[in-house]
Image (cartoon, helix red, strand yellow):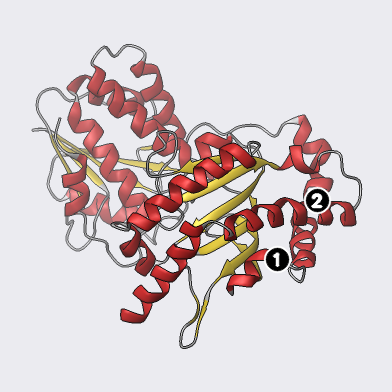
Amino acid sequence: MDSLLVHLRKYRPRENTDPLENFVTEAFAWLLRSSDRLRNEVMHCINLRLSNHAVLPKGDCEISTQENFNGKFPDLVIRWDACTWVFEHKVWSNLHHDQLKNYREYIDSTHVENRIILITAKTYQHEQNPDAALCWQDIYECLKKFNTQVTDEQLNWAINDFLSLLQSEGLGPTTPINRFSMTHYLEAIKFDSQVDDLFKSSENHIWPLSKLGFKPVFKRQKTEGRVGLEFCPEFDKTGRAWLPGIFFGTLLDAKDHGVKKIINGELMFCIVFDFNRLGQEHIKSSSTYKAFKDKLEKLIITDFHKWQFLDTFSNKDAIHNKWHPLIILQPMMGVLGQSSSHDEQLAIIHKLFASFQEKLINLPEFKCLIEELREFKEKA
Protein backbone atom coordinates (compact mmCIF):
# COMPACT_ATOMS: atom_id res chain seq x y z
CA MET A 1 0.00 0.00 0.00
CA ASP A 2 1.56 3.32 -1.02
CA SER A 3 1.77 6.33 1.28
CA LEU A 4 -1.20 8.66 1.73
CA LEU A 5 1.05 11.26 3.34
CA VAL A 6 3.32 11.29 0.29
CA HIS A 7 0.35 12.00 -1.97
CA LEU A 8 -0.93 14.74 0.33
CA ARG A 9 2.54 16.29 0.40
CA LYS A 10 2.52 16.49 -3.41
CA TYR A 11 -0.85 18.27 -3.36
CA ARG A 12 -0.58 21.88 -4.49
CA PRO A 13 -3.60 24.07 -3.63
CA ARG A 14 -5.22 25.91 -6.51
CA GLU A 15 -7.14 29.16 -6.44
CA ASN A 16 -10.90 28.85 -5.86
CA THR A 17 -10.70 25.25 -4.65
CA ASP A 18 -11.89 23.83 -1.35
CA PRO A 19 -8.97 22.22 0.55
CA LEU A 20 -11.38 19.67 2.06
CA GLU A 21 -12.43 18.51 -1.43
CA ASN A 22 -8.80 17.95 -2.36
CA PHE A 23 -8.07 16.18 0.91
CA VAL A 24 -11.02 13.79 0.46
CA THR A 25 -10.01 13.22 -3.17
CA GLU A 26 -6.43 12.28 -2.29
CA ALA A 27 -7.61 9.95 0.46
CA PHE A 28 -10.15 8.34 -1.90
CA ALA A 29 -7.56 7.91 -4.67
CA TRP A 30 -5.10 6.38 -2.20
CA LEU A 31 -7.77 3.92 -1.09
CA LEU A 32 -8.59 2.93 -4.68
CA ARG A 33 -4.90 2.31 -5.38
CA SER A 34 -4.54 0.16 -2.28
CA SER A 35 -6.59 -2.83 -3.46
CA ASP A 36 -7.76 -4.14 -6.85
CA ARG A 37 -10.65 -5.88 -5.14
CA LEU A 38 -11.74 -2.71 -3.36
CA ARG A 39 -11.48 -0.65 -6.55
CA ASN A 40 -13.55 -3.21 -8.49
CA GLU A 41 -16.23 -3.08 -5.79
CA VAL A 42 -16.42 0.72 -5.93
CA MET A 43 -16.52 0.64 -9.75
CA HIS A 44 -19.36 -1.87 -9.55
CA CYS A 45 -21.32 0.42 -7.20
CA ILE A 46 -20.77 3.35 -9.56
CA ASN A 47 -21.68 1.25 -12.61
CA LEU A 48 -25.11 0.63 -11.10
CA ARG A 49 -25.68 4.40 -11.17
CA LEU A 50 -24.62 4.90 -14.79
CA SER A 51 -27.39 5.88 -17.16
CA ASN A 52 -26.01 3.20 -19.49
CA HIS A 53 -24.22 0.43 -17.64
CA ALA A 54 -20.67 -0.08 -18.80
CA VAL A 55 -18.70 -3.24 -19.25
CA LEU A 56 -16.41 -2.90 -16.26
CA PRO A 57 -12.80 -2.56 -17.41
CA LYS A 58 -10.37 -5.36 -16.64
CA GLY A 59 -6.66 -5.30 -15.92
CA ASP A 60 -4.26 -2.72 -14.62
CA CYS A 61 -5.21 0.94 -14.48
CA GLU A 62 -3.61 4.29 -13.80
CA ILE A 63 -5.14 6.51 -11.08
CA SER A 64 -4.20 10.17 -11.10
CA THR A 65 -5.33 13.36 -9.36
CA GLN A 66 -5.12 17.00 -10.51
CA GLU A 67 -4.55 15.95 -14.10
CA ASN A 68 -4.40 18.79 -16.63
CA PHE A 69 -7.19 18.66 -19.22
CA ASN A 70 -5.99 21.60 -21.31
CA GLY A 71 -6.18 23.99 -18.37
CA LYS A 72 -9.05 22.21 -16.60
CA PHE A 73 -8.35 19.94 -13.62
CA PRO A 74 -10.73 17.07 -12.83
CA ASP A 75 -10.32 15.70 -9.34
CA LEU A 76 -9.63 12.08 -10.26
CA VAL A 77 -8.94 10.17 -13.48
CA ILE A 78 -8.84 6.37 -13.80
CA ARG A 79 -7.42 5.04 -17.08
CA TRP A 80 -7.55 1.54 -18.51
CA ASP A 81 -6.26 0.64 -21.98
CA ALA A 82 -9.63 1.11 -23.65
CA CYS A 83 -11.56 3.29 -21.21
CA THR A 84 -11.21 6.40 -19.05
CA TRP A 85 -13.39 7.41 -16.11
CA VAL A 86 -13.24 11.07 -15.06
CA PHE A 87 -14.38 12.11 -11.56
CA GLU A 88 -15.42 15.48 -10.22
CA HIS A 89 -15.79 15.69 -6.42
CA LYS A 90 -17.72 18.30 -4.49
CA VAL A 91 -18.21 18.69 -0.77
CA TRP A 92 -20.34 21.79 -0.19
CA SER A 93 -19.63 23.82 -3.31
CA ASN A 94 -21.39 23.64 -6.67
CA LEU A 95 -20.00 22.93 -10.13
CA HIS A 96 -18.45 25.77 -12.10
CA HIS A 97 -20.08 26.88 -15.33
CA ASP A 98 -19.81 24.10 -17.96
CA GLN A 99 -17.31 22.24 -15.77
CA LEU A 100 -18.39 18.74 -16.79
CA LYS A 101 -18.92 19.81 -20.40
CA ASN A 102 -15.30 20.96 -20.57
CA TYR A 103 -14.09 17.63 -19.25
CA ARG A 104 -16.24 15.73 -21.72
CA GLU A 105 -15.06 17.75 -24.71
CA TYR A 106 -11.44 17.13 -23.79
CA ILE A 107 -11.79 13.42 -23.11
CA ASP A 108 -13.94 12.90 -26.25
CA SER A 109 -11.06 14.28 -28.28
CA THR A 110 -8.90 11.34 -27.18
CA HIS A 111 -11.27 8.90 -28.96
CA VAL A 112 -11.50 6.47 -26.05
CA GLU A 113 -14.62 5.22 -24.31
CA ASN A 114 -15.22 7.39 -21.25
CA ARG A 115 -17.52 8.12 -18.35
CA ILE A 116 -17.96 11.30 -16.30
CA ILE A 117 -18.69 10.62 -12.62
CA LEU A 118 -19.90 13.30 -10.17
CA ILE A 119 -19.71 12.72 -6.41
CA THR A 120 -21.13 15.37 -4.07
CA ALA A 121 -22.27 15.88 -0.49
CA LYS A 122 -25.98 16.12 -1.34
CA THR A 123 -28.23 15.30 -4.28
CA TYR A 124 -29.17 18.95 -4.82
CA GLN A 125 -25.63 19.45 -6.16
CA HIS A 126 -26.25 16.99 -9.00
CA GLU A 127 -26.28 18.90 -12.27
CA GLN A 128 -24.69 19.19 -15.74
CA ASN A 129 -25.71 15.63 -16.73
CA PRO A 130 -22.82 13.40 -15.66
CA ASP A 131 -22.96 9.74 -16.67
CA ALA A 132 -23.36 8.89 -12.99
CA ALA A 133 -24.15 11.10 -10.01
CA LEU A 134 -23.58 9.85 -6.47
CA CYS A 135 -23.26 11.25 -2.97
CA TRP A 136 -20.37 10.53 -0.65
CA GLN A 137 -22.90 8.68 1.47
CA ASP A 138 -23.23 6.17 -1.39
CA ILE A 139 -19.47 5.63 -1.37
CA TYR A 140 -19.61 5.30 2.42
CA GLU A 141 -22.28 2.59 2.26
CA CYS A 142 -20.43 0.74 -0.52
CA LEU A 143 -17.17 0.68 1.43
CA LYS A 144 -18.84 -0.18 4.72
CA LYS A 145 -20.53 -3.22 3.16
CA PHE A 146 -17.31 -4.28 1.44
CA ASN A 147 -15.37 -3.91 4.69
CA THR A 148 -17.36 -6.71 6.32
CA GLN A 149 -15.69 -9.10 3.84
CA VAL A 150 -12.13 -7.80 4.34
CA THR A 151 -9.64 -9.98 6.23
CA ASP A 152 -6.54 -7.86 5.51
CA GLU A 153 -5.98 -5.84 8.72
CA GLN A 154 -4.14 -3.02 6.96
CA LEU A 155 -6.85 -2.61 4.33
CA ASN A 156 -9.51 -2.83 7.03
CA TRP A 157 -7.78 -0.01 8.92
CA ALA A 158 -7.52 2.12 5.75
CA ILE A 159 -11.22 1.71 4.95
CA ASN A 160 -12.28 2.51 8.52
CA ASP A 161 -10.08 5.60 8.54
CA PHE A 162 -11.63 6.88 5.30
CA LEU A 163 -15.13 6.16 6.60
CA SER A 164 -14.27 8.14 9.75
CA LEU A 165 -13.10 11.04 7.59
CA LEU A 166 -16.39 11.09 5.66
CA GLN A 167 -18.42 10.79 8.85
CA SER A 168 -16.52 13.58 10.63
CA GLU A 169 -17.06 15.96 7.72
CA GLY A 170 -20.80 15.25 7.48
CA LEU A 171 -20.40 13.13 4.33
CA GLY A 172 -21.56 9.85 5.83
CA PRO A 173 -25.14 8.70 6.49
CA THR A 174 -27.48 11.53 7.44
CA THR A 175 -29.29 11.05 10.72
CA PRO A 176 -33.02 11.89 10.87
CA ILE A 177 -34.54 14.59 13.06
CA ASN A 178 -35.55 12.85 16.27
CA ARG A 179 -38.60 13.50 18.42
CA PHE A 180 -36.54 14.89 21.30
CA SER A 181 -35.05 17.59 19.04
CA MET A 182 -38.49 18.60 17.72
CA THR A 183 -39.97 18.71 21.22
CA HIS A 184 -37.18 20.77 22.80
CA TYR A 185 -36.04 22.92 19.87
CA LEU A 186 -37.59 26.19 21.03
CA GLU A 187 -36.02 25.82 24.48
CA ALA A 188 -32.67 24.77 23.03
CA ILE A 189 -32.31 27.87 20.83
CA LYS A 190 -32.50 30.01 23.99
CA PHE A 191 -29.41 28.25 25.37
CA ASP A 192 -26.81 30.42 23.61
CA SER A 193 -28.16 33.66 25.00
CA GLN A 194 -28.69 32.14 28.45
CA VAL A 195 -25.16 30.78 28.77
CA ASP A 196 -23.76 34.07 27.41
CA ASP A 197 -25.68 36.01 30.05
CA LEU A 198 -24.39 33.69 32.76
CA PHE A 199 -20.72 34.29 31.96
CA LYS A 200 -21.13 37.97 31.08
CA SER A 201 -22.72 38.49 34.48
CA SER A 202 -19.82 36.73 36.20
CA GLU A 203 -17.15 38.78 34.40
CA ASN A 204 -17.21 41.53 37.04
CA HIS A 205 -17.12 39.21 40.03
CA ILE A 206 -14.02 39.05 42.23
CA TRP A 207 -11.75 36.33 40.87
CA PRO A 208 -8.64 34.98 42.64
CA LEU A 209 -6.59 34.99 39.43
CA SER A 210 -6.84 38.79 39.35
CA LYS A 211 -4.31 38.83 42.22
CA LEU A 212 -1.69 37.66 39.70
CA GLY A 213 -2.74 40.14 37.03
CA PHE A 214 -4.98 37.74 35.11
CA LYS A 215 -8.11 39.72 34.23
CA PRO A 216 -11.26 38.02 32.86
CA VAL A 217 -12.77 38.87 29.47
CA PHE A 218 -15.98 37.30 28.19
CA LYS A 219 -15.40 35.27 25.02
CA ARG A 220 -17.63 33.30 22.68
CA GLN A 221 -15.03 31.61 20.51
CA LYS A 222 -16.43 29.89 17.44
CA THR A 223 -13.19 28.24 16.29
CA GLU A 224 -12.52 26.79 19.74
CA GLY A 225 -16.19 25.89 20.21
CA ARG A 226 -16.48 27.40 23.68
CA VAL A 227 -18.04 30.26 25.64
CA GLY A 228 -16.94 31.71 28.97
CA LEU A 229 -14.24 33.83 30.62
CA GLU A 230 -10.68 34.03 29.35
CA PHE A 231 -7.99 34.98 31.87
CA CYS A 232 -4.66 36.17 30.43
CA PRO A 233 -1.62 38.06 31.65
CA GLU A 234 -1.15 41.49 30.08
CA PHE A 235 2.07 42.85 28.61
CA ASP A 236 2.86 46.52 28.14
CA LYS A 237 3.42 46.54 24.39
CA THR A 238 1.38 43.62 23.11
CA GLY A 239 -1.50 43.42 25.56
CA ARG A 240 -3.12 40.10 26.49
CA ALA A 241 -1.41 36.86 25.51
CA TRP A 242 -1.83 33.13 26.06
CA LEU A 243 1.24 32.86 28.30
CA PRO A 244 -0.73 31.08 29.51
CA GLY A 245 -4.36 31.82 28.80
CA ILE A 246 -6.74 30.07 31.19
CA PHE A 247 -10.31 29.60 30.01
CA PHE A 248 -13.23 28.93 32.34
CA GLY A 249 -16.51 28.19 30.62
CA THR A 250 -18.65 25.74 28.68
CA LEU A 251 -17.30 23.54 25.90
CA LEU A 252 -19.93 23.60 23.16
CA ASP A 253 -18.01 21.71 20.47
CA ALA A 254 -15.13 19.47 21.52
CA LYS A 255 -13.65 18.93 18.05
CA ASP A 256 -11.07 21.73 18.12
CA HIS A 257 -9.87 20.72 21.59
CA GLY A 258 -9.51 17.10 20.48
CA VAL A 259 -11.74 15.62 23.21
CA LYS A 260 -14.84 14.82 21.17
CA LYS A 261 -14.48 11.09 21.80
CA ILE A 262 -14.12 11.66 25.55
CA ILE A 263 -17.16 13.88 26.16
CA ASN A 264 -19.41 11.84 23.82
CA GLY A 265 -21.80 14.69 23.05
CA GLU A 266 -22.29 15.85 26.64
CA LEU A 267 -22.13 19.55 27.52
CA MET A 268 -19.15 20.19 29.77
CA PHE A 269 -17.84 22.94 31.99
CA CYS A 270 -14.19 23.31 31.09
CA ILE A 271 -10.95 24.77 32.41
CA VAL A 272 -8.43 25.01 29.57
CA PHE A 273 -4.79 26.06 29.67
CA ASP A 274 -3.95 27.77 26.38
CA PHE A 275 -0.50 28.61 25.00
CA ASN A 276 0.39 30.80 22.02
CA ARG A 277 3.25 29.92 19.66
CA LEU A 278 5.85 31.45 21.98
CA GLY A 279 4.47 29.54 24.93
CA GLN A 280 4.34 26.30 22.96
CA GLU A 281 8.02 26.66 22.13
CA HIS A 282 8.93 27.23 25.76
CA ILE A 283 6.96 24.40 27.39
CA LYS A 284 8.51 21.79 25.08
CA SER A 285 11.62 21.69 27.26
CA SER A 286 10.48 23.38 30.46
CA SER A 287 10.95 21.30 33.60
CA THR A 288 8.79 23.87 35.37
CA TYR A 289 5.90 23.16 33.00
CA LYS A 290 6.25 19.42 33.60
CA ALA A 291 6.31 19.94 37.37
CA PHE A 292 3.25 22.21 37.15
CA LYS A 293 1.37 19.69 35.01
CA ASP A 294 2.09 16.88 37.48
CA LYS A 295 1.09 19.01 40.46
CA LEU A 296 -2.11 20.15 38.69
CA GLU A 297 -3.14 16.57 38.02
CA LYS A 298 -2.58 15.66 41.67
CA LEU A 299 -4.61 18.70 42.75
CA ILE A 300 -7.57 17.57 40.63
CA ILE A 301 -7.39 14.04 42.04
CA THR A 302 -7.18 15.13 45.67
CA ASP A 303 -9.30 18.30 45.84
CA PHE A 304 -11.51 18.36 42.76
CA HIS A 305 -12.35 14.72 42.10
CA LYS A 306 -15.52 15.55 40.14
CA TRP A 307 -13.34 17.13 37.46
CA GLN A 308 -11.49 15.08 34.83
CA PHE A 309 -7.90 16.09 34.07
CA LEU A 310 -6.70 15.58 30.48
CA ASP A 311 -3.24 16.00 29.06
CA THR A 312 -4.16 15.79 25.37
CA PHE A 313 -0.56 15.00 24.44
CA SER A 314 -0.56 11.71 26.33
CA ASN A 315 -4.25 10.76 26.57
CA LYS A 316 -4.96 7.97 24.05
CA ASP A 317 -8.58 9.06 23.56
CA ALA A 318 -7.70 12.70 22.85
CA ILE A 319 -6.33 14.37 19.73
CA HIS A 320 -3.51 16.67 20.80
CA ASN A 321 -3.99 20.35 20.04
CA LYS A 322 -0.81 22.24 20.97
CA TRP A 323 -2.83 25.42 21.56
CA HIS A 324 -4.89 23.72 24.31
CA PRO A 325 -2.71 20.96 25.82
CA LEU A 326 -4.33 20.77 29.27
CA ILE A 327 -8.09 20.46 29.70
CA ILE A 328 -10.18 19.86 32.82
CA LEU A 329 -13.82 18.83 32.38
CA GLN A 330 -16.98 18.34 34.44
CA PRO A 331 -20.52 17.62 33.12
CA MET A 332 -22.59 20.80 33.09
CA MET A 333 -25.79 18.97 34.00
CA GLY A 334 -24.26 17.64 37.21
CA VAL A 335 -23.41 21.17 38.33
CA LEU A 336 -26.55 23.09 37.33
CA GLY A 337 -29.11 20.32 37.05
CA GLN A 338 -30.96 21.17 40.29
CA SER A 339 -30.74 24.98 40.03
CA SER A 340 -33.84 27.00 39.21
CA SER A 341 -32.79 30.64 38.70
CA HIS A 342 -30.16 32.71 36.91
CA ASP A 343 -28.84 34.15 40.17
CA GLU A 344 -28.53 30.69 41.69
CA GLN A 345 -26.62 29.42 38.66
CA LEU A 346 -24.40 32.49 38.70
CA ALA A 347 -23.46 31.83 42.33
CA ILE A 348 -22.80 28.16 41.58
CA ILE A 349 -20.39 28.73 38.69
CA HIS A 350 -18.55 31.50 40.53
CA LYS A 351 -17.99 29.22 43.52
CA LEU A 352 -17.04 26.35 41.20
CA PHE A 353 -14.37 28.24 39.26
CA ALA A 354 -13.19 30.57 42.06
CA SER A 355 -12.47 27.66 44.40
CA PHE A 356 -10.25 26.14 41.72
CA GLN A 357 -8.50 29.43 41.06
CA GLU A 358 -7.75 29.85 44.76
CA LYS A 359 -5.95 26.52 44.85
CA LEU A 360 -4.24 27.21 41.51
CA ILE A 361 -2.64 30.50 42.51
CA ASN A 362 -1.19 28.87 45.62
CA LEU A 363 0.76 26.34 43.58
CA PRO A 364 4.43 27.43 43.56
CA GLU A 365 4.90 25.64 40.23
CA PHE A 366 2.16 27.77 38.64
CA LYS A 367 3.77 31.01 39.80
CA CYS A 368 7.15 29.82 38.54
CA LEU A 369 5.68 28.94 35.14
CA ILE A 370 4.08 32.38 34.81
CA GLU A 371 7.37 34.07 35.63
CA GLU A 372 9.31 31.85 33.19
CA LEU A 373 6.88 32.65 30.38
CA ARG A 374 7.07 36.38 31.10
CA GLU A 375 10.88 36.32 31.02
CA PHE A 376 10.84 34.20 27.87
CA LYS A 377 8.58 36.72 26.15
CA GLU A 378 10.76 39.67 27.17
CA LYS A 379 13.82 37.98 25.66
CA ALA A 380 12.04 37.01 22.44
The amino acid at mark 2 is Ile
The amino acid at mark 1 is Trp
Residue 371, placed above or below residue 27: below
Q: Is residue 233 left or right of residue 74?
A: right
Q: Which mark is residue 207?
A: 1
Identify residue for label 2. Answer: 348
- Let me know if residue 126 appears in the view: no
> Which SS class for mark 2?
helix
Nearest the camera: 313 or 121? 313
Q: Residue at x 70, y 57 (%)?
A: 354
Circle 2 Cα neighbour tier, 10 Å, few/some/many (<14 / 14–19 / ≥20)? some
Q: Residue at x 88, y 55 (%)?
A: 342
Nearest the camera: 183 or 295? 295
Residue 233, placed above or below residue 77: below
Q: Earlier in the sequence, mark 1 or mark 2?
A: 1
Q: Name, please, the residue furthest toward the bottom.
A: 237
Q: Name, please, the residue furthest toward the right.
A: 340
> Which SS class for mark 1?
loop
Q: On the rendered image, what quadrant is the C terminus found in?
A: bottom left
